[in-house]
Image: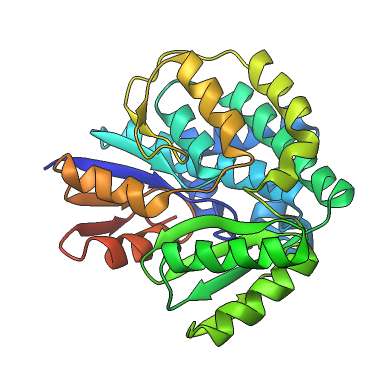
Amino acid sequence: MPTAFLFPGQGSQFVGMGRDLYDREPVARALFDEADERLGLALSRLCFDGPEEALTDTAVQQPALFTTSLAAWAVLRARGQTDAAYLAGHSLGEFSALAAAGALRFADGLALVRRRGELMKLAGERSPGGMAAVLGLDAGPVAELCARAAAESGRFVGVANDNCPGQIVISGDEVALALAVEQLTAAGARKVVRLPISIAAHTPLMAVVAEEFAAAVDAAPLREAAIPVIANVTARPIHTPDDIRAELKAQLTSPVAWTDSIRYLGEQGVDTYLEVGPGDVLLGLVKRIDRQAERIKFEL
């Protein structure tokens, strides 16, 4: 049956992730050891032992998730279990998907996500913002209310992640975000929860580091993807290095169209999803989008 492999983004990390893979799987151990050496950082120790505060630092979190997901993929590949029709990753997970598709070598992807994490952290300092999860409203009404809050405040707030029907993440300037939270609550959102994040990911507020990140993307060696990767921005397959570069640059300041991505995969006949990496957040979102699909978790 047509299968799509999914790679998680930030928020799926947990202290202890990847430890069992490291202990029992030589191919996984090799990737963690390589990451430690290339970064000059005890990344594996932070994944396995924490502390949690260090692991949630975005400059550490992104390479940690990338390495853990690729270690899991390496194990599946060694077992001959990577027969995927499509790959997709949520936000940071898109880099894992591209590496799994052969478009990025592990070392190059590791350097790129490390730089991405550093720059996103810097963007939070240059142009502070925040994020909130909105439950019980769909993307259209949420986008309209965010546009109203942005117009009233004169500052940006908008949809950052269209995760699934009834679960939207918004992101933006603190003043506009606070106003949007008020208006969304008044409009009947079941719950609006501020996230413990001090950056406005996937919005124009990230533009303050866009030029620096674009330079890193341009410098990264890319190849044709051997497996189609569904892009976060367009919810359509990307293959060529030019398409991949354009997607990665746009993704920094654009919403993640996850609902549309899963719906597109369903239209292509995909009926089985396997999440590769820490947690099972993406399988939960798939359940809300396509209740008939089979969902499989690769246990770390």
Question: What residue is shown at x 43% (from left), y 78% (from top)?
Answer: 136
Does any portion of residue 217 appear in the rendered image?
A: yes
| Front residue of this view, candidates 133 and 279 | 133
**Where residue 122 appears, x then y in whole percent?**
84, 44
| Front residue of this view, candidates 267 and 18 | 267
Q: Quadrant of the N terminus?
A: top left
Check the image and report above or below for 59 versus 104: below
Asked which colour scheme the image uses, the reply is rainbow
In this picture, residue 86 sits left or right of residue 197 = left
Question: How many labels, in total?
Answer: 0
In this picture, residue 56 sits left or right of residue 275 = right
In this picture, residue 16 sits left or right of residue 290 = right
Check the image and report above or below for 162 versus 73: below
Residue 182: image quadrant is bottom right
Does any portion of residue 41 appear in the rendered image?
A: no
| Front residue of this view, candidates 224 and 177 | 177
**Where residue 216 appears, x then y in whole percent?**
71, 22
**Where residue 243 appears, x then y in whole percent?**
46, 20
Residue 162: image quadrant is bottom left
Residue 245: image quadrant is top right
| Front residue of this view, candidates 174 and 1 | 174
Q: Quadrant of the C terminus?
A: bottom left
Check the image and report above or below for 103 versus 27: above
**Where residue 72 appears, x then y in whole percent?**
44, 43
Question: What residue is shown at x 47% (from left), y 76% (from top)?
Answer: 135
Question: What residue is shown at x 57% (from left), y 84% (from top)?
Answer: 185
